[in-house]
Image (cartoon, rainbow, N blue to C red):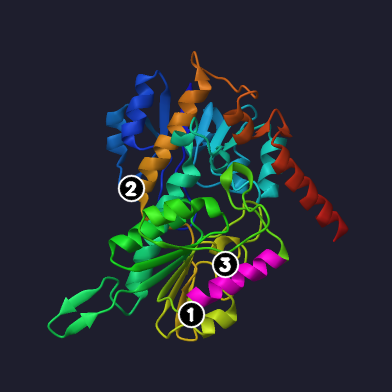
Amino acid sequence: MKIAVIKEIGHGEQRVALIPDIVSRLVKQGLEIWVEAGAGEQSFWSNEAYTQAGAEIVTDADKLWHEADVVLKVSPPTPTEASKLRSGVTLISCLTPLANEQLMSQLADRGVTSLAMELIPRSTRAQSMDALSSQASIAGYKAVLLAAAALPKYFPMLTTAAGTIAPAKVFVIGAGVAGLQAIATARRLGAIVEAFDIRPAVKEEVQSLGAKFIEVPLTEDTVGENGYAKEVSHSVKELTQQTISQHVHTADVVITTAQVPGKKAPLLVTAEMVSQMRPGSVIVDLAAEQGGNCAYTEAGKSIDRHQVMVIGTVNLPASVPVHASQLYAKNISTLLLYLIKDGVLNLDFTDDIVSSTCVTHEGKICHDRVRAFVDSTSQASVVV
């Protein structure tokens, strides 16, 4: 079986799907690994390192797309890249399937079997394959470092000969994987941390990291598929904003992480809230690519509003490419080895890992939620 590792071409994307250490393990399992020349350079792995691990360096990119049995990527393929995939090939990558209907249709039309890494179920059995969590953890960590660099204050409390410096106050909105890592990192830097999440079950996790959990009495279920937060009613959104507002005003740093898969990010930090923050405060919005949790967020930009710096981060894991690639390579290789039986890729759709992750197969979109999304988008386009 020939496994191809593609060089990422997306703007700012420095990760690679497999690192040499993982390549070595896969080669020992009898797999033939092809790596596009230069694929690991942005994450500091040389062609020589891959060769020593047992991979074949391929300079002709078309060979990878046309002849491999399995293609591995980090970011979704561009339309041009997808057009190079032959019928019957298996693509394993992040695909943003609930926001990219054209790619999903293109992969189905070309007869590509595609598996989306962000759709790995959140279960104990699939934990080592969960790329969404491994990359979100890096994003939460880096978000705090960006905030600390932008904040015109210390994070920790310091007692000096010139007086005592009070610790910074950090408010984290959303206590998923990214939020929890942000809490832990801010606490390590010495900040006082508060956190809010509409899922009351995360209270103990927040408190275990040394942060104060902000509670809101809610009367409806706020937990969706796979344990993620789900979209809530207008009344709950209003109550949430009222509660958040009180803590945003007193925070030096606000880090927002609230996202709902397949939906626009909920607006949590309004323009009015920003206007009432102290001058020099910082907001880091990890939901920028989905529209942002802050009214002023612009994806990929850092802007000043009312003397508050609003940082609309995009693809933060790619800014930590060594460890991001290491974790992603472990995730994707674990899934790959799980699917391979007797040297053949075996897709058992009675297995929840396969049925949850496989998006297109045998010329069709086989994932119910993705198919419904593509159909609804197509119908909306016809109406317009």
Kind of residue indicated by mark 1: His
Q: Position of residue 322 (x, y in %)?
A: 33, 47
| Residue 372 horizontal side relative to residue 43, left or right | right
- Magenta region: 235-247
Ranked by sequence position, the earlier of labels 1 and 3 is 1
Query: Which class describes the residues within 10 Å of circle 2: few (<14), some (14-19), or many (20+)?
Result: some
Coordinates of residue 337 in the picture (x, y in percent):
46, 24
Q: Is residue 80 left or right of residue 283?
A: right
Label drawn at residue 293: 3
> Which one is earlier in the sequence, the residue at label 2 or at label 1?
1
- Do tag 3 and tag 2 residues touch (Cβ < 8 Å)? no
Lower sequence index among marks 3 and 2: 3
Residue 261 against residue 280 in the figure, above or below? above
Q: Check disc 2 and give the amino acid type.
A: Val
In the displayed image of the protein, which residue is found farthest to the top?
Answer: 342
Q: What residue is at 24 percent from the left and 79 percent from the top? A: 165
Name the front one of labels 2 and 1.
1
Q: Which residue is mark 1?
A: 249
Q: Residue at x 81, y 56 (%)?
A: 381
Mark 3 secondary-structure assignment: loop
